[in-house]
Amino acid sequence: MQEFDVVVIGAGAVGENVADRAAQGGLSVALVEAELVGGECSYWACMPSKALLRSATVLREAQRLPGAAQAVTGELDVPAVFARRNSFTSDWDDAGQVEWVVGAGIDLIRGHAVFTGVKELLVTAPDGTRTPVRARHAIAVSTGSAALLPDIPGLSAARPWTSRDATSAKQAPKRLLVVGGGTVGVEMATAYAGFGTAVTLLSRGPLLANQEPFAGDLVTESLRELGVDVRLGVSAERIERGDDGVVRATLPGGEIVEADEVLVAIGRTPRTGDLGLETLGLEPGAWLDVDDTMLVQGPDGHALEGEWLYATGDVNHRALLTHQGKYQARAAGDAIAARAKGLPVDDAPWGRHVATADHASVPQVTFSDPEVASVGLTAAAAEKAGLRVRVVDYEIGNVAGASVHLDGYKGTARMVVDEDRGVIVGATFVGADVADLLHSATIAVVGEVPVKRLWHAVPSYPTISEVWLRLLETYGRDSA
C-alpha cells in the first residue's frame, strides 16, 4: 500500500494544477495517469487544434492586406503545418511533462485507477502490476471527458473520427464530413478547409448555438466563403463506410453525402464509467456533481462523509474548458490543503477556495475565422435569469484600429448590461484577433465594474480595443 496525503486521478492540465496547489500547501501528492501526462489539452485538444488552425488563418489575413498580399506567392504548406502541430505535442511524448511533475515534488503512478473503498484505490499499470494506493486526506478525480458518439445507424462501424483523430491526423483527407456545429466542429471544419479538404458540415441547429446568434451567423457566412458546405437543420439518418473505404451519410429525403472521413463532434461524455464509483454509492458513467469547493456531492445532495472526494475539470460538467478546469483545480487544491491542516475554508462567493466564476463569468474563445470570444451571459440567458438588461452592439470594422489591422474588417461586438446594477454581465466579440479583447471584458464582468467607471478606462488608439469606447458611447453617458 502506497500512502499519500492527496491522490489525483488524471494528470492532465487540471489534475496537474490540483496536485501542484496541494503540494505547495505542504501535502504529499501522487498523480495517477493511464495515458500521457499533460492530458487532452496538450496532445489532442487545445494545443494541436490551434496549431492546425493558425497557419491558414495567417495566410488568409496576409492575402487580404495590400503589400503583404503581393508578397504571398505560394500556397499553404500543409505537411509543414502538421509538422508544426507535432512540435506542439512533442510527438506525443510526455517526457517534458513528467520532468515538471518530478520537479514539483509530486509522485507519478502510471496506470488505471479504480476505487476500492473510502480514500482507497487500486492502480493497474500497463504491464498488469497492481498497486493499492491510499489517501490520508483527499482524492481528486480529474479524468476529463471523451467524445460522445450519437446513436446513428451504422456510425460505430464506420470508424468515425473523434476530436482526437482530427487533431492527431497525419494528413488531410480529400473529403471530410463533420457532424456537429459546436466549437470542435466549427474549428476543425475551418482547419481542414484551409488545407484544401472539401468539407461538409451537418448541424441540427445554428452553428455555435450557445453563443449570441450573430456569432453563428458570421461564422456560417465565413465557412461558406471558405468553401465549406454548411447544412443547417440537418441530421444524418445513417452513416456507413463501404468496402471501398468511402463514408456515405444518408440525409433526410435520401440524399447521400460521400466523404473519406467523418468527424463526429456533437458533445462530450464523462470519463467515469470504469473508476469503480459504485463502490462509493455513485453512478458509474455519470457526471460528478460538486459544490463550489469541488467536493463531490452524493445522491443525497451532500458531500460524502468525511469530505474527501473532489472532482475538477470536465468531469464535473460545470464548464468544459481547460482554463476553467485549471481555475477549479487551484481552488480545490488550496481547499484540500486548508481542510487537511484544519484551517478555515473561504467558501463565500469569490473566496479563495471556490470557483464562483463557473456560474456566470466563463470566458471562452472559438478559434474560427472570424474568432468568437465571449464571457458571461448572452442576452437571451440574461433575460432568462430575470435580469432587466440593455443590449448594445457595435460593428468592430468601424473602429479605426480594426481598419488599420485588416482591410475590410468584418465583425461585431456586444455588451449586455444589467440596468438595475449598472454593470456588464456579458460580452461577445466576433472578428479577426478578438481573443485578445476578452480578458478586459472578463475583468469587467467578474469585477462588476460599474459602466460609469468604465468611461475612465481609456483604450489606446488606434487599436481594436477602441471598440470599448464605441460601445460605451452607443450605450450613452447619461444612461451610465
Image (cartoon, rainbow, N blue to C red):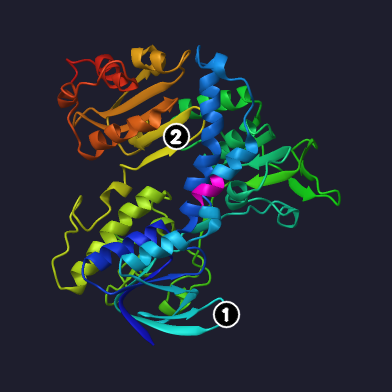
Residue located beneath label 2 in the image? 211
Q: Which residue lies furthest to the right in this view?
A: 243
Label 2 sits on a secondary structure element that is loop
Crowd band around label 1 with a 10 angstrom C-alpha radius: few (<14), some (14–19), many (20+) = few
- 374 to the left or right of 474: right
**Quarter containing the N terminus:** bottom left
Residue 127 badge: 1
Q: State the quadrant of the C terminus.
A: top left
Residue 441 is one of the magenta-drawn residues: no
Residue displayed at 23% across by 27% down: 419
- Residue 78: x percent and y percent? 64, 36
The tag on residue 459 is: none
Residue type indicated by callout 1:
Asp
Relative placement, left or right, of 224 versus 435 is right
What residue lies at 31% left-to-right and 52% top-to-bottom? 327
The correct choice, above or below, for 309 with respect to 248 in the image is below
Left or right of 38 on screen, residue 261? right
Q: Quick one: 82 or 44, which is closer to the camera?
A: 82
The kind of residue on which mark 2 rests is: Gln
Q: Judging from the image, what secondary structure is the residue with disc 1 in? A: loop
What range of the chain is rendered magenta?
Answer: 85-89
Q: Where is residue 212 in the image (x, y as percent from the top left)?
A: 43, 30
Q: Quadrant of residue 171?
A: top right
**Can residue 355 be seen at all in this image of the molecule?**
yes
Determine whether 130 is above or below 368 in the image: below
* Residue 182 appearing in the image: no
